[in-house]
Image (tube, helix red, strand yellow):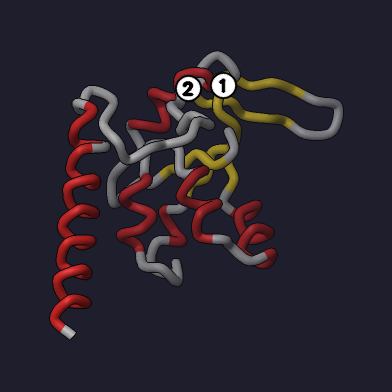
Amino acid sequence: MVEKEDSKNEVKYYSLEEVQQRNSCKSTWLIIHNKIYDVTKFLEEHPGGEEVLREQAGGDATESFEDVGHSTDAREMTSMYMIGELHPDDRPKIQRPADTLITTANETSSWWTNWVIPGIAATIVTLMYRLYMTEE
């Protein structure tokens, strides 16, 4: 643990390794926006259940926290559990999703799976439609 003194407050910095070690029922720490939270005492009170917090324990829970869309009250409540910040040297080590477009097509798949199969399906549908229309 590294400490930094400000004129008003003392900020405690924790390494990523220290946070990762706090992943048990006796000690549950999370990282949200590079701040460290000890949520051990909040596990039983969490509206989404303690399992949700335990799944994120010892790591970065920022994306999960934001995806849920916590209320203003919930965001204010986090200050009660904040114990420090992630050390600046460890911040780049946290893997966050890239801001890139995710496609469902496999880049290594061949062209026929992307064009020929839908083309064949369209042809079959067209033939079935014409057959149906000529019977009337």
Q: In the depicted view, which residue is nearer to us: 1 or 132?
A: 132
Say which residue appears at 58% left-offset and 25% top-offset. Answer: 13
Q: CA distance from mark 2 to mark 1?
A: 5 Å
Residue indicated by mark 2: 15
Tag 2–tag 1 contact (CB < 8 Å): yes
User: Farthest top residue?
Assistant: 89
Task: Residue type at mark 1: give it.
Answer: His
- Rendered position, 129 above or below 61: below
- Rendered position, 129 above or below 26: below
| Disc 2: CA contacts within 10 A as few (<14), some (14-19) or many (>=20) | some
| Disc 1: CA contacts within 10 A as few (<14), some (14-19) or many (>=20) | some
User: Farthest right residue?
Assistant: 7
Residue indicated by mark 1: 87
- Rendered position, 88 above or below 24: above
In the displayed structure image, the side of residue 123 where residue 35 appears, left or right? right
Say which residue appears at 58% left-offset and 62% top-offset. Answer: 70
For label 1, the SS is: loop
Coordinates of residue 53 in the picture (x, y in percent): 38, 54
**Nearer the N terminus, badge 2 or badge 1?**
2
Q: In the depicted view, which residue is nearer to us: 85 or 107?
A: 107
For label 2, the SS is: loop
